[in-house]
Image (cartoon, rainbow, N blue to C red):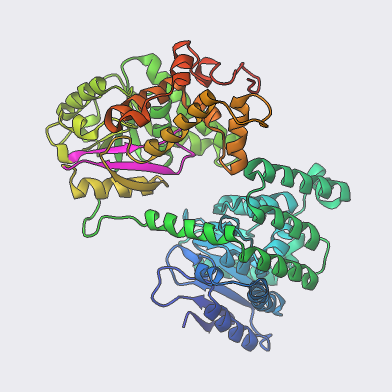
């Protein structure tokens, strides 16, 4: 059994607690159990409220069972599964007593849709609270009423944004959006729940959930006028096409479905949702994205069996450039104290400015409050020497990609830090084994390769040598996951994984440029090759990417790969000539494209 029902002081509680699982899933079996409970409750008008709760720590309901979605092979089967869930949540919505979703953790996918079907939503201040509809990342969209209820509850623009991006929101943002009605502390939660129920019964909370949010001014005009709604849908399509190039059908079909059911009653609106979901669930794109999800989850759950990771509370960073500043910001955001070192105050100022800008942007986008940014920024301190490094748990080296410089730094580090500290290098291609030779204890040395921009890129490479201890590996993997990254563990071989793949791709683009494109291709070959690859599905073309990375950086890594892997990684002549002329890409204002300040790129 996943669900139980109990009564206490005239309040009914539907409790989710899936057996043998750390999370609750809205499986077919769970929905059937809920259906039976709702049938029983349909005749109980004496209850003051029905509260849906989870007995799992930090989890309300994590979503539907993806394996059930993966098993859909016919559109009509997908539509049938959608309608079955819709019918049960409609029963919940139609109960003649107030229904409350008490959210004290993750409420995603079907869990969010169940909460939307309730008349009220009460969330806690738990920092683990995340509410959202991530189905678009699986090539589908919400199909238990989410496309119908969410835009009506929080407004068309925000509803579309949540469904089209799949990004969940925390408790504070959920309250601002109107996604939840009230927040309560975890301590004394029973008292706050009873107060909320009393307020509902005394009419202090509007009973119509769609009438609680009252937009004013331009938002009200856009949401209530035909022209405003047309504009919102048009901009949503444009944004999706810009981001996906039309390769992913789910976002566009979600817009079309919402655009249609926004003007329909619940019965016809949900029927539109079910049929569209069935069509998406059988696509190759959905099946492949589900496969990608399984792989990603495997790496998110990565750990070293039998080895407990050491806690990391303090971190040192060597090198305050763009990468060092980005890493410092990421760590401070994760509530880790950071000691940032460089050789002069100008470099330290650059690193602090990089971190501060990221926090300013987060405040500007309302992802955090100004005082929160100040508190987190204050976790970063700076130094020109190794003062404060003796008490750090891990040190991340992010200096220039030069073996002699890194050797010197690690010699100094080995003498300056305590015996428990992990020494991590952010090298993108140099031998971690060679770097580790400069230290007293090579078992504490590991590669930890972040990608730029640090705050956006989800992947980190963790590079182990033959001497790296299992404890060092376990601690570094746990550290990467704490930062919200997906770690991949690779051995210390030339180029590791990402650069070995990426630089081969970029170098081959250079060969195509040298050889020329076949007849019939229009336009400049740099632009044409970039367009061919973006049309294929790449987020940006190889020459645009090279300008972003920097031709000097790309050339340096290619030479390292050439020395280790042979002639096939020799930089093509067009790269070397372009770099030699000072065309380094965006950083110099010119590369394969011109990058004039304040202007979009041009050839």
Horizontal and vertical percent for residue 160? Answer: 69, 52
Residue at x-position 73% and y-position 54%: 255
Horizontal and vertical percent for residue 567? Answer: 33, 28
Is 253 on the left or on the right of 476, as rendered?
Answer: right
Is residue 447 part of the magenta span, yes or no?
yes
Q: Residue furthest left?
A: 440
Is 62 on the left or on the right of 233, as rendered?
Answer: left
The magenta stretch is: 444-466
Q: Residue furthest top?
A: 581
Q: Residue furthest right?
A: 226
Residue 501 lies, with reference to residue 190, above or below; the image says above
Q: Count the numbered circles shown.
A: 0
The one nearer the camera, 506 or 254, is 506
Is 442 on the left or on the right of 259, as rendered?
Answer: left
The one nearer the camera, 151 or 452, is 452
User: Does residue 188 appear in this view?
Assistant: no
Image quarter (top left, top right, bottom left or bottom right) of the C terminus: top right
Is 153 on the left or on the right of 389, as rendered?
Answer: right
Residue at x-position 66% and y-position 87%: 44
Horizontal and vertical percent for residue 205? Answer: 70, 64
Residue at x-position 48% and y-position 17%: 584
Residue at x-position 63% and y-position 22%: 601
User: Does residue 343 appear in this view?
Assistant: yes
Q: In which quarter of the view is residue 279 placed?
A: bottom right
Is residue 372 part of the magenta span, yes or no?
no
Residue 405 lies, with reference to residue 276, above or below; the image says above
Residue 568 lies, with reference to residue 252, above or below; the image says above
């Amino acid at each position: 059994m996943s669900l139980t029902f109990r009564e206490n002081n005239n309040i009914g509680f539907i409790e989710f607690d899936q057996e043998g699982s750390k999370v609750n899933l809205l499986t077919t079996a769970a929905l059937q159990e809920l259906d039976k409970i709702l049938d029983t409750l349909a005749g109980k008008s004496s209850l003051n409220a029905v509260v849906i709760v989870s007995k799992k720590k930090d989890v309300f309901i994590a979503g539907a069972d993806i394996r059930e979605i993966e098993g859909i092979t016919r559109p009509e089967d997908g539509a049938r599964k959608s309608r079955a869930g819709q019918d049960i949540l409609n029963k919940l919505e139609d109960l003649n007593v107030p229904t409350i979703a008490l959210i004290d953790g993750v409420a995603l996918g079907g869990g969010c849709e169940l909460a939307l079907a309730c008349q009220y939503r009460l969330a806690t201040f738990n920092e683990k609270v995340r509410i959202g509809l991530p189905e678009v990342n699986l090539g589908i969209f919400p199909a238990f009423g989410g496309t119908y209820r969410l835009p009506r509850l929080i407004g068309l623009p925000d509803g579309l944004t949540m469904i089209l991006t799949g990004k969940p929101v925390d408790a504070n943002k959920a309250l601002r959006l109107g996604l939840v009605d009230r927040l309560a502390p975890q301590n004394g939660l029973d008292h706050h729940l009873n107060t909320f129920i009393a307020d509902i019964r005394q009419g202090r909370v509007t009973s119509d959930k769609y009438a609680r949010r009252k937009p004013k001014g331009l938002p009200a005009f856009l949401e209530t006028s035909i022209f405003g709604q047309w504009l919102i849908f048009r901009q949503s399509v444009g944004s999706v096409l810009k981001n996906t190039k039309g390769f992913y059908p789910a976002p566009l079909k979600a817009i079309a479905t919402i655009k249609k059911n926004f003007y329909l009653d619940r019965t016809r609106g949900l029927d539109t949702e079910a049929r569209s979901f069935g069509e998406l669930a059988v696509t190759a794109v959905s099946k492949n994205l589900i496969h990608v999800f399984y792989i990603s989850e495997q790496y998110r759950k990565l750990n070293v069996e039998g080895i407990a990771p050491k806690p990391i509370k303090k971190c040192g960073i060597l090198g305050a450039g763009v990468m060092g500043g980005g890493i410092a910001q990421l760590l401070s955001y994760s509530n880790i104290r950071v000691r940032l070192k460089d050789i002069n105050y100008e470099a330290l100022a650059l690193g602090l400015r990089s971190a501060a800008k990221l926090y300013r942007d987060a405040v500007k986008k309302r992802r955090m409050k100004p005082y929160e940014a100040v508190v987190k920024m204050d976790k970063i301190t700076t130094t020109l020497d190794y003062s404060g490094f003796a008490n750090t748990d891990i040190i991340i080296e992010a200096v220039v990609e030069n073996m002699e410089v890194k050797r010197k730094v690690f010699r100094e580090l080995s003498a300056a830090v305590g015996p428990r500290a992990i020494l991590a290098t952010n090298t993108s291609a140099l031998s971690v084994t060679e770097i580790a030779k400069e230290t007293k204890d090579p078992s504490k040395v590991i590669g930890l390769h972040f990608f730029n921009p640090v705050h956006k890129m989800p992947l980190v490479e963790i590079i182990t040598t033959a001497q790296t201890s299992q404890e060092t590996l376990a601690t570094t993997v746990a550290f990467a996951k704490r930062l919200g990254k997906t770690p991949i563990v690779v051995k210390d071989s030339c180029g590791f994984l990402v650069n070995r793949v990426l630089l081969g791709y970029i170098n081959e683009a250079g060969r195509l440029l040298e050889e020329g494109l076949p007849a019939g291709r229009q336009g400049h070959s740099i632009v044409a090759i970039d367009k061919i690859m973006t049309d294929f599905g790449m987020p940006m073309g190889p020459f645009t990417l090279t300008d972003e990375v920097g031709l000097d950086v790309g050339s340096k890594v290619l030479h390292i790969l050439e020395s280790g892997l042979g002639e096939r990684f020799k930089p093509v002549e067009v790269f070397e000539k372009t770099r030699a002329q000072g065309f380094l890409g965006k950083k110099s204002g010119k590369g394969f494209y011109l990058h004039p300040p304040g202007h979009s790129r041009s050839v």
